[in-house]
Image (cartoon, rainbow, N blue to C red):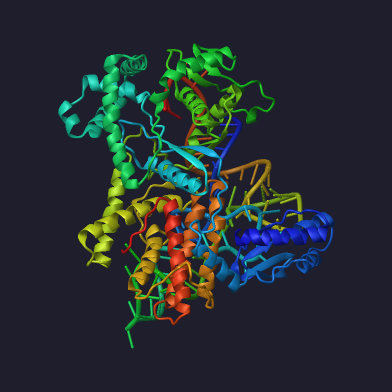
Amino acid sequence: MTLLQNLESHLASALQSVTGEPTQPNIAPAADLRFGDYQSNSAMVLAKRLKTNPRALAQSILDNLAIDDLATAKIDGPGFINFTILPQAYASFTKNLLADPRLGVPQPGLNTRIVIDFSAPNVAKPMHVGHIRSTIIGDSLCRIARFLGYNVIADNHIGDWGTQFGMILHGWKTILDHNALSQDPIKELVRVYRIINASTKDDPATLETCKNELVKLQAGDPENLAIWQQCIDVSKLGLEKIYSILDVKFDHWLGESFYNDMLAPLVDDFIEKVLARESNGAICIFSDDSKDPSQDPFKVHREDGWQDNPAIIRKADGGFLYATTDLATIQYRIDTWNADQIWYIVGIPQQLHFRQIFEAANRWGKSANFRHIAFGSILGEDRKLMKTRSGDNVGLTDVLEEAIDRAAKIIAEKNPTLPPDEAAQIAQTVGIGAVKFAELSQNRLTDYVFAWDRMLALQGDTAPYLQYSNVRIRSIFRKLDTDFDPTTATISLEKNEEIHLARLLARFSEILPQVLEDFRPNILANYLLELARAFHSFFEACPVLKSDEPLKSSRLALCHLTSRTLETGLGLLGIKCPERM
RNA sequence: GCUCCCGUAGUUCAAUGGAUAGAACAAGAGUUUCCUAAACUUUAGAUACAGGUUCGAUUCCUGUCGGGAGCACCA
């Protein structure tokens, strides 16, 4: 039980005594430490309902509160009840954490299966910075959900069957340089794709040829299929390399092509069940004349009033689309994997698409807790969206290499005596950590302009700041010349820096479940910054190795617990901790 | 035209309807015979505008202004 839950249950029984009926307590971490650790506005909420004086009501709540060994409580302002946890309560709480492999974190997710759909790059095209958000946020949410006990399936729904293959097939047959292909396959595929893509823009005939190549591929043409397979194979190798640097893993790589055989029967089924009908030659899912068009994902407003904006599941030329594949994917995930929830880590611009396919799936009888976990866009210098097809995006590989490079330079400067192998390893851990943390420490909905210095900063609120606090702890334990057993240590807290550190350590278990309430890893990231700040202050103010027992053991225990919390927390963001730096 | 997202210190970002709106960077002032100064301590600085709901609004509602995105055969 967390300290918050503990206070909550005490407050609940006090409220019941006062009101004579079960009453939901309102209690939360205090906005500001000068008020205390936790604050409750239950008295104000209740006073309104009971039409009494909030401060008087707060007093009678206090009279019924039995928390002497846990916290002090007092009434402040218009009727807040502020709780200050006693240092000895923090001491015994953190002592218990020392022996708990889960650091006090509950497992609300047992018996729930979640499919998380993230990253989903297009093959035969390199990943650029625009792909970073889905990949890093999705990976972090996977790790956090697993830690909270959920049964998570990480699925990389790669774009291996789309229109771009029409262009690549056409390019492969007309302008491919086979020498270049054997040297650097992805580079050559990108070259071919870019040339053809550019020429389709002002030549309708080329566009038509590409479409035909795609239709042939989707119909099973052996030649196109063989070329396609080669493209997939080389592209996957390139993707695996990046995922390995990022330390991102998937349980499945079921791309669009996997669902190909399910598409035609799916459309037939929609037609048969009168969930979709023909319009201008295409098969579409329409609104069902809902009373409130603004709530209906299939209705949009145009100049001349509300119109249906159907989800097209089969084109007039017989081809299938994004929506078709996504519906087949939902079918598979529910029928085969028994998904209770499906999370899509995809940008905001696709909001309408997801509203439509979630609604279509529900009508079709395929129901799960669908969540579109949207994120803001990465913008170019011109504050315009960096689009997948706009050409000159910064490659993801370049960003990662630059990050590692910058970290290496700083390591060489700060710690020149490190062996080269270790220094290189640390550069990777620090550089990649910085990139991930830059992404995860801000609200996912915020748009931002891509800037090297922003993404690769190594000072301030960054991963290296967190990693460095852990390095300081490791250094203490390297220099420790006596035995230390964290499971038998006793913690006593005297200085403010010690109390504050313990306070934050106790809070880890409260913070983590909160992350999934609205899918915001930045809550965890910001908590870890606070924890690291508290540790650095503690480190400056409270000597560890030079203290006498029993203080020394108590401080060692705090260090030990801080290190475990930092490593666990950073691990949930997909960030590693070096031993030295 | 309609729908959605956004507007917070000089800059980049925080803030479950709560009290005196938090950090970091940049700027100013300090700290190292002491466990890694990639650190610590400290000064100054902000809610686009106008209404409304509320004991209480950065947060909820309405409007205005400003930025971005989406709206039938791309994904």
**The one of A180 and B11 positioned closer to us in this rendering:** A180
Q: Tell how many labels.
A: 0
Q: Is residue A46 above or below residue A533?
A: above
Q: Is residue A178 left or right of residue A143?
A: left
Residue B15: image location, x then y, percent: 57, 55
**Residue sticking out furthest to the left:** A179
**The one of A563 and B66 positioned closer to us in this rendering:** A563
Q: Is residue A577 above or below residue A291?
A: below
Q: Is residue A20 left or right of residue A405?
A: right
Residue A558: image location, x then y, percent: 47, 69
Q: Which residue is at 31% across, 46% downward? A: A245
Q: Do we see residue A175 in this rendering?
A: yes
Instruction: Choose top left, top right, bottom left or bottom right for residue A183.
Output: top left
Q: Is residue B75 above or below residue A74?
A: above
Residue A455: image location, x then y, percent: 37, 52
Q: Do we see residue A304 in this rendering?
A: no
Quadrant location, the N terminus of chain A: bottom right
Q: Which residue is at 80% across, 56% downward? A: A48
Residue A163: image location, x then y, percent: 37, 23
Quadrant location, the C terminus of chain A: bottom left
